[in-house]
Image (cartoon, rainbow, N blue to C red):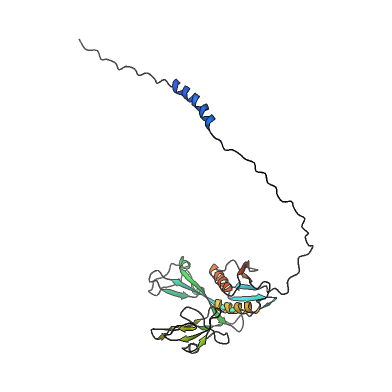
Amino acid sequence: MAKQLKKAPKQKEMDMLPVMSLMTVLIPVLLTMTAFQKLAIVEINLPERSEIAFESEPPPPDDNALNLTVALSSGYVEIWARGGSLPKVFFKEMWTFRCKSDNDTITYDPSTIGASNPPKCQDGTVLDAEKFKYSIETIHLWTLHKESEEDPGKIEMSVYSRSDSAYLDGNNEFITEKSAAQPGSTVATLSESSSRRLACGQSAVGVEDICSDGKLAITLRPRSAYDELAKSLIMIHNRFIDSPDADNIIVLADDDTAFDKIINIMDRARDAGFFKINLSKLAGG
């Protein structure tokens, strides 16, 4: 006779009623123990509004104010003060690139650069036609001597020291020939109290060594329009030091002006003693 198979006992469903009852008891208990954020009211007394007497007309302009303004336009820099202006400083803009291929620098006239004519490095590598602007290291403004605005102009040259400072002679004029900056010559730079005697192989207080390995390390190169501007600003600050706004200057530029140019002008103004610098948009820019 065949054996009958035993059936597995049927599992009983878990009774959740005790657990639910427990939670029903715990929830009110937990709520009573919770510390809620307390609100506090702080009483304050504001000062009473005073009556201010406004003038019907703005105060008259100060005739002694300098009102110094530097306007950076396309192709020139101009200084305005007290309703007058100094002669325009014309310049030729040049771009210096840093090549990643040989870590060397190249300088180009931006007007000659285009998508079909990108800058070329010394080793023959051509910069990306679409991204070459990201390789700009320095934007130069080379001073031009022009008889009129239509005159293409001639690049002004100056002698520069090893530390990249332009030399000035005893008449506060830029030195334009190396023969005027030889050992034994007395020169100055655009820094305050910078008069010094030039020497070769000798360095001391008031003496500058302009030689390297026995050779002159000074250079003759295009004069920066920033240096031309700095010279004028120093002269203006020293002459009008007693003006009520002697430390103020306004820098005007249009929307298309590269920020590097504005920063350079601000640096020259600060070095000349104008520490309160305001930026403004050039009319028509």
Q: Is residue 142 above or below residue 116?
A: below
Q: What is the residue that sits farthest to the top in this orientation?
A: 1
Q: What is the residue that sits farthest to the right in this orientation?
A: 56
Residue 146's spot in the image, x, y percent? Answer: 59, 83
Residue 137's spot in the image, x, y percent? Answer: 47, 70
Is 59 on the left or on the right of 126, as rendered?
right
Q: Tell me what residue is drawn at x 47 percent, y 23 percent.
A: 22
Task: Give the camera-side residue of 154 and 199.
Answer: 199
Quarter of the image where one finds residue 67: bottom right
Q: Tell me what residue is drawn at x 44 percent, y 23 percent.
A: 19
Residue 43's spot in the image, x, y percent? Answer: 67, 44
Q: Is residue 172 above or below residue 17?
A: below
Is 89 on the left or on the right of 204, as rendered?
right
Total labels: the figure holds 0
Instruction: State which quarter of the image contains the C terminus.
Output: bottom right
Q: Is residue 53 above or below residue 112?
A: above
Asked if residue 176 can be seen in this view, the reply is no
Asked if residue 76 can be seen in this view, the reply is yes
Q: What is the residue that sits farthest to the left in this orientation?
A: 1
Instruction: State which quarter of the image contains the N terminus.
Output: top left
Residue 6's spot in the image, x, y percent? Answer: 27, 15
Task: Give the camera-side residue of 194 and 118.
Answer: 194
